Image (tube, rainbow, N blue to C red):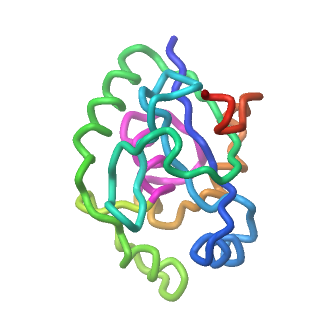
């Protein structure tokens, strides 16, 4: 078995406050550790409004966060890692974010991502259930939903300064 780590961020900027208000959650962003199996990673892989899907430096976002882990097989790990590498460079899914707050129709796309949608899709694509939701609903998954998962296990390390 392998472990994949991801973090749920508790941001405080304007965009974060809007997300927190809408989702009724402290969590406003979700992204993977990079490398995936490192609890104190060199970087973070996720979708952000600025830059879309990228691997960012470990200290690019200094907001408090909680770290979570999920166990997967070696095969699932390799498939998820390869799939995520293939998402790098794709743009942020602004339409999906707007749709989540206003409309009720599916706007999922394999060409654009927002943070929690990318996290959910990476696991769901290879049948690693972290939430009981179909892949077709991935444009409705929020960081709050991920935080409520009973599959993701909290990890004690939760300060970006612990990585130094």
Look at the picture and state if 113 lies above or below 93: above
In the figure, 100 relative to 63: above or below?
below
User: How far across and how far down the image is residue 61, in percent?
Assistant: 55, 52
Find the residue positioned furthest to the bottom. 102
Q: Residue at x 64, y 38 (%)?
A: 160
**Which range of residues does the magenta coloring cover?**
115-135
Question: Is 148 on the left-hand or right-hand side of 101?
Answer: right
Q: Quadrant of the C terminus?
A: top right
- Answer with the quarter of the image where residue 39 lies: top right
Q: Is residue 40 magenta?
A: no
Instruction: Please state the horizontal and vertical placement of residue 131, each as a whole percent of the image.
Output: 60, 46
Residue 95 in the image: x percent, y percent?
36, 78
Front-most of residues 104 and 41:
41
Is 69 left, or right, of 57 in this rendering?
Answer: right
Q: Residue at x 63, y 48 (%)?
A: 8
Residue at 62%, 62% (x, y): give it: 28
Q: Position of residue 141 (x, y in %)?
A: 54, 60
Q: Is residue 47 left or right of residue 39?
A: left
**Total numbered circles:** 0
Between residues 96 and 105, which one lies in front from this camera angle? 96
Quadrant in which residue 67 is drawn: top right
Image vertical order of residue 147 relative to residue 81, above or below: below
Give the residue displayed 57% in from the left and 75% down from the top.
Answer: 15
For this rendering, which residue is in front, 8 or 124? 8
């Amino acid at each position: 078995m392998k472990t994949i780590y991801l973090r749920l961020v508790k941001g405080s900027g304007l965009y974060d406050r809007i997300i927190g208000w809408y989702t009724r959650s402290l969590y406003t962003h979700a992204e993977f550790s990079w490398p995936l199996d490192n609890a104190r990673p060199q970087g973070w892989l996720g979708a952000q409004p600025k830059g879309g899907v990228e691997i960012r430096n470990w200290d690019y976002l200094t907001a408090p966060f909680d770290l979570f882990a999920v166990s997967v097989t070696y095969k699932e790990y390799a498939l998820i890692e390869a799939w995520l590498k293939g998402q790098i460079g794709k743009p942020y899914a602004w339409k999906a974010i707007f749709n989540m707050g206003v409309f009720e129709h599916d706007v999922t796309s394999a060409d654009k991502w927002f943070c929690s949608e990318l996290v959910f899709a990476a696991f769901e694509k290879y049948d690693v259930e972290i939430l009981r939701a179909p892949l077709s609903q991935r444009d409705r998954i929020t960081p709050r939903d991920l935080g409520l998962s009973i599959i993701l296990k909290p990890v004690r390390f939760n300060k970006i300064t612990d990585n130094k």
